[in-house]
Amino acid sequence: MPAQTTLAVHELMEAHEILNFKTVCLIKSKMMQGLVFDKDLKALLEKDVRQSLQDIRDLQHLYAKLQIQ
């Protein structure tokens, strides 16, 4: 993979929408953790939080390499 990736403006906007979506998912899962008493559901929410955090970090890392076409 090249050091920098070139995206068209609409592709950059789609990546931004994905980042926003993952952020909303993270917030929702974190808030729901305090309301859930079922251990299995709580574990699933914790897993979702970890995965969302990783996805957000990956997208932020990608943003650092992007150029707009």
Image: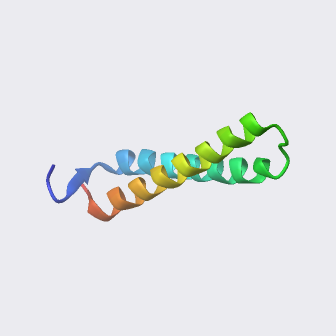
8 or 16: nearer the eye? 16
Image quadrant in which you'd find residue 40:
top right
Residue at horizontal 42 percent and vertical 48 percent from the top: 15
Left/right placement of residue 2 relative to residue 33 reads left
Residue at horizontal 35 percent and vertical 51 percent from the top: 9
Left/right placement of residue 9 relative to residue 21 reads left
Question: x, y percentage for residue 13?
Answer: 43, 50
Looking at the image, which residue sits at the far front?
39
Left/right placement of residue 18 relative to residue 11 reads right
Residue at horizontal 85 percent and vertical 42 percent from the top: 37
The image quadrant where one finds the C terminus is bottom left
Question: x, y percentage for residue 29?
Answer: 70, 47
- Number of numbered discs: 0
Q: How is the image coloured?
A: rainbow
64 or 6: nearer the eye? 64
Image quadrant in which you'd find residue 48:
top right
Looking at the image, which residue sits at the far left?
2
Question: x, y percentage for residue 30?
Answer: 71, 53
Residue at horizontal 19 percent and vertical 58 percent from the top: 4
Q: Is residue 66 above or below residue 14?
A: below
Question: x, y percentage for residue 63?
Answer: 35, 60
